[in-house]
Image (cartoon, helix red, strand yellow):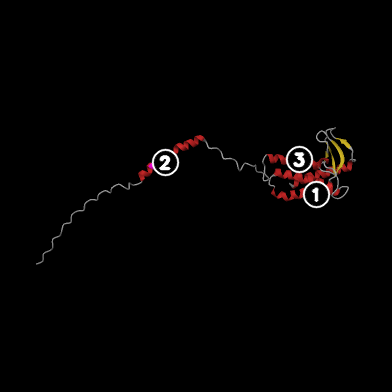
Amino acid sequence: MAGVALCAYGLDQLSKYLVVSNLTEGETVPVLGPVLQLLFVRNSGAAFSLASGMTWIFTIIASLVIVFIIWFASRIRSKAWAVVFGLLLGGVLGNLTDRFLREPSFGMGHVIDFISTPWIVPAIYNVADMAIVSSMVLFLILSLRGIGLDGSRAGKANADPAEPDPMATDAAETATPAAAASGEVAAVAETPAADAPAAPSAPSAPVTPTAPESRD
């Protein structure tokens, strides 16, 4: 996330430096005819020149957003979500730098805008605005696809179990009574008959008395 944020922030600040150094405020430079133009303006409002004149409010909001992203960053485990929050952090930080460091005063500075595409939107914007909008688009895509902050897809873990095969179920139901019957037969064969009469024992041989010895 930090790498994406640094790239977005660096491109934004470099492009603004080049515009301020080489263009006159209000000057229009066609790049691709009416499709893409460079128009240097100073914006006191939000992205795309919205709500001009409320600079201090956007300075506070942008500061809170940056604090939240830094606090929330430890929960991000997905590369895709890292790109989302990296673009958002870099874009917000790029415009916030203008708020703090540019004229007319600290915290009330005007943001440098210079990209004009009238066939898309009539407003003028900059690289930071593009990063913020791109992060919002990616946010919606990942949310609609159910991708969590850890990269897992919602519903995969809670997927419904597969329906049982009806043929296998019928076969199991048919085999159950037969197995039960065979089990009962085996149990009867192995269990001794408790009520059967005991076999008579053989009669003992008669005892012959011994004659006493005669004494003279």
Residue found at x 88% / y 36% = 29
Is tag 1's residue or tag 2's residue first in the polypeptide sequence? 1
Q: Of discs 1 and 2, which sits in the foreground?
A: 1
Residue 3 appears at what percent x and percent y? 75, 46
Q: Of discs 3 and 2, which sits in the foreground?
A: 2
Residue at image mark 3: 134
Q: Which mark is residue 180?
A: 2
| Residue found farthest to the left | 216
Main SS class of the magenta portion in the image: helix
Residue type highlighted by circle 3: Ser
Q: Is residue 181 magenta?
A: yes
Residue found at x 82% / y 47% = 57
Mark 1 surroundings within 10 Å by alpha-carbon count, few (fewer than 14), some (14 through 19), many (20 or more): few
Residue type highlighted by circle 2: Ala
Is tag 1's residue or tag 3's residue first in the polypeptide sequence? 1
Query: Label 1, label 2: how many angstroms apart (C-alpha)?
Result: 77 Å
Residue 34 appears at what percent x and percent y? 85, 32
Quadrant location, the C terminus: bottom left
Residue 172 appears at what percent x and percent y? 47, 38
Residue type highlighted by circle 1: Ile
